């Protein structure tokens, strides 16, 4: 149950019952125990968006983890921007800030800039990091699940030495995917496919509230699905990858006003890009059958000029059972999405001590499903 609150954020009692599969009486007794131990806090809140939602916006009583129970820090070491966001375990964002950095800034320097930013934010907002539970860091480029990468090791070791807490590193687009699934356009769903259309094209897959890594940590690399076997070579080693055709870099080379939909050339290029993207998404949707496809990045801001041809192609090429259930939507979070994803990674991965406490206090759920390990799929 603690794990559900940590991964999903504030929940009503009804939502908790749905998430944990516990009876009302059992749940009520566990909640009382945890409230008395101050592991939980109860407050009046807006009905949080999520499973079993009724009467959105109406004030209701929601349960959260005790906000004093710990902090999580998210850092995004982006291509041109460094973002830091701090949240408590009750999903309240307590500080956030960003600075620009040059594209070729070395990794050591990027980490230093991020640590300076953390220092500034904690001083300005009088935040003590003594209760810091972990740090989630997003970086550009692939992060293999097992292989040792100098870049990843440098980031992990420097940040971990600085704060003395567990540090989790992942690709920043994948972290943005996780954040959209927790707080953004995919909030409350169990399966979300995320596609980011920017200077590069990346993606991520979130299943049961958790980022799905795949065997090598590359699940959701939609930008490197080949759309033309005779197409241009791609740095990934492939040929004719989607990214070669629909990245902002490629499109801007053909039309500098690509984001200005008043331009007819831009509109034609966007329509063509939308169709290509829709075809690739169709294959991905037939494989995963997600509840929602979330599209982020600068190109998503062109709206219907991209989305209409995209959705038409997606529906044309998916199985009827797949396109009947999928919803395509624009990303809801801003430029701090990847840093928030770092926080979500800490909340879903770290803090295992709380999980142990939960399993000690909780009577095993019926039937013996995965309740208590977080992200229990709910059926709606
Ligand atoms: Zn490629």
Image: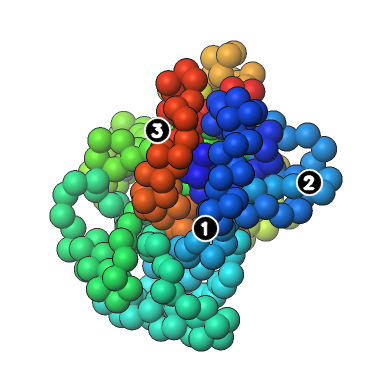
Q: In the rendered view, would you say 82 is above or below 331?
A: below
Say what secondary structure mark 3 lies in.
loop
Looking at the image, which residue sits at the far top? 320
Alpha-carbon distance for marks 2 and 3?
A: 49 Å
Residue 97 location in percent, x, y?
Answer: 54, 75
List the residue tagged with mark 2. 60
Q: Which mark is residue 89?
A: 1
Q: In this view of the protein, which residue sits in the foreground, 197 or 13?
A: 13
Determine crowd level at label 2: few under 14, some 14-19, many 20+ residues with C-alpha closer than 10 A: some
Q: Which mark is residue 227?
A: 3
Ligand 1 shown in quarter: top left
Label 1 vs 2, first from the N-terminus: 2
Residue 54, by quadrant, is top right
Is 153 situated left or right of 277 in this image? left
Whether tag 3 and tag 1 are in contact, CB under 8 A, the answer is no
Label 3 vs 1, first from the N-terminus: 1
Residue 260 location in percent, x, y?
Answer: 67, 58
Say what secondary structure mark 1 lies in.
loop
Residue 175 location in percent, x, y?
Answer: 44, 52
């Amino acid at each position: 149950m603690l794990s559900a609150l940590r991964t999903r954020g504030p929940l009503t009692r009804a939502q908790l019952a749905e998430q944990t599969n516990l009876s009302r009486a059992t749940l009520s007794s566990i909640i009382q125990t945890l409230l008395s131990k101050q592991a939980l806090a109860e407050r009046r809140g807006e009905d949080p968006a999520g499973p079993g939602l009724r009467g959105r916006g109406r004030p209701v009583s929601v349960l959260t983890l005790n906000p004093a129970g710990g902090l999580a820090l998210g850092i995004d070491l982006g291509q041109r921007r460094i973002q830091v966001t701090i949240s408590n375990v009750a999903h309240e964002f307590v500080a956030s800030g960003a600075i620009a950095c040059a594209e070729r800034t070395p990794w050591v320097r990027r980490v230093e800039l991020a640590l300076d930013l953390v220092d500034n934010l904690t001083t300005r907002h009088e935040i003590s990091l003594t209760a810091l539970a972990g740090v989630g860091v997003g970086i550009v480029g692939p992060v293999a699940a097992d292989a040792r990468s100098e870049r990843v090791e440098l980031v992990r070791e420097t940040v971990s030495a600085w704060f003395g807490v567990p540090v989790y590193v992942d690709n920043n687009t994948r972290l943005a995917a996780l954040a959209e699934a927790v707080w953004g356009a995919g909030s409350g769903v169990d399966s979300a496919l995320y596609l980011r259309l920017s200077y590069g094209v990346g993606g991520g897959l979130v299943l049961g509230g958790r980022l799905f890594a795949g065997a090598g940590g590359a699940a959701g690399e939609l930008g490197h699905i080949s759309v033309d076997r005779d197409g241009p070579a791609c740095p990934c080693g492939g040929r004719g990858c989607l990214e070669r055709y629909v990245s902002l870099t490629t499109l801007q080379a053909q039309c500098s006003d690509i984001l200005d939909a008043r331009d007819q050339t831009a509109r034609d290029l966007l329509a063509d890009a939308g169709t290509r993207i829709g075809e690739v998404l169709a294959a991905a949707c037939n494989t995963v059958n997600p509840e929602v496809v979330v599209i982020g990045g600068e190109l998503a801001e062109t709206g219907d000029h991209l989305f209409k041809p995209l959705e038409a192609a997606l529906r044309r090429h998916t199985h009827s059972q797949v396109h009947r259930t999928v919803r395509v939507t624009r990303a809801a979070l801003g430029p701090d999405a990847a840093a928030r994803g770092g926080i979500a990674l800490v909340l879903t991965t770290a803090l295992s001590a709380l999980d142990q406490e939960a399993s000690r206090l909780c009577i095993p759920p019926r039937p013996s499903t995965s309740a208590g390990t977080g992200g229990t799929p709910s059926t709606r």
